Image (spheres, rainbow, N blue to C red):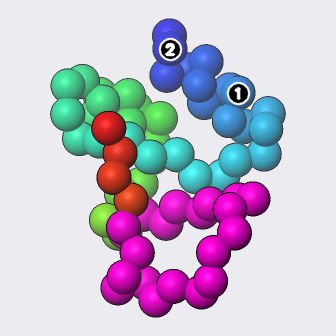
Amino acid sequence: MLVRNGLILAKNAGFDVMNALELMHNMDFIEELKFGPGDGYLNYYLYNWRCPPIENEKMALVML
């Protein structure tokens, strides 16, 4: 139910990409909802954050 509500909210907000890890029971609903596998590369966009241009190889994001 939580994932279904999240998908509805994402669609209403105009999102076209959803990420999920392959653990717990995620694959059950991922396959059922006809989601396709990604390429393994995730892009994170930081808005309203000022800094000089940084090369991709020198950028990192730590998620806790």
- The segment highlighted magenta reads 41-60
Per the image, is 1 magenta? no
Above or below residue 50? Residue 26 is: above
- Secondary structure under badge 2? helix
Left or right, 3 with reference to 6: left
Query: What residue is at 78 percent from the left and 45 percent from the top?
Result: 14
Marks 1 & 2, CB-CB < 8 Å contact: no
Residue position marked by numbered label 1 in the rendering: 9
Rendered image quadrant of residue 52: bottom right
- Secondary structure under badge 1? helix
Measure the C-alpha gap from mark 1 to mark 2. 11 Å
Per the image, is 45 magenta? yes
Rendered image quadrant of residue 28: top left
Q: Which amino acid, mark 1?
A: Leu
Above or below residue 42? Residue 53 is: below
**Relative depth, front residue between 2 and 42:** 42
Left or right, 15 with reference to 53: right
Q: Callout 1: 10 Å neighbours few (<14), some, many (20+)?
A: few
Residue 51: percent from the left, percent from the top? 63, 75
Check residue 2 in the rendering and tell me which mark sits there, or answer none: 2
